[in-house]
Amino acid sequence: MSSQDIAVIIENFELLDDWEDRYRYLIELGKTLEPLPDEARTAANKVQGCVSQVWLVTHWKEGRAGFQCDSDAFIVRGLLAILVAVYSGRTASEILAIDALEIFRKLQLEEHLTPQRSNGLKSFVERIRSDARQVLVTT
């Protein structure tokens, strides 16, 4: 999934009026994530602050971010797929300039997430932003 796919995701969400359909779509998005190898399921790759088990590996190639991530929760995997679509292929500076939570508000997802899921989502976004800041400091 690439960053330009976020426009398609937003468009698809706007076509779905019923929240059950939106949740089903979210679960389908989660199934599009590339599998995370077992050896990447380490404490260092685990995202803190998530109730579910969530792992993130950020790869930088030619200054652009790529991600591998996974969760043990279907809805969370869908949320991760949206974030991968938002951030993949972006530079560290672009990542820091993006308000991913605004995209979730636009999709009206934030209001349908439990407080724990919202906090986990924010933790995942902050982890990506932290990885981007680290790249900027070391380059």
Image: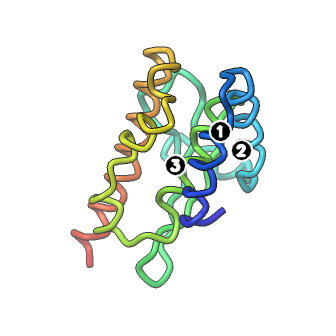
Q: Is mark 3 on a helix, strand or loop?
A: helix
Which residue is pictured at 71% across the width and 42% down the height? Answer: 30
The picture places residue 16, in percent across and down from the top left corner, at 68, 34
Comes first in the chain, label 3 or label 2? 2
Residue 117 higher or lower than 70, as above or below: above
The quarter in which the C terminus is drawn is bottom left
Which residue is pictured at 69% across the width and 52% down the height? Answer: 39
Alpha-carbon span between mark 2 and mark 1 = 5 Å
Alpha-carbon span between mark 3 and mark 2 = 11 Å
The residue at which mark 3 appears reads as 83
Report whether 11 appears left or right of 44: right
Picture disc at residue 29: 2
The residue at which mark 1 appears reads as 78
Residue type at the position of mark 1: Gly
Residue type at the position of mark 2: Leu
Comes first in the chain, label 2 or label 1? 2
**The furthest residue to the left:** 137
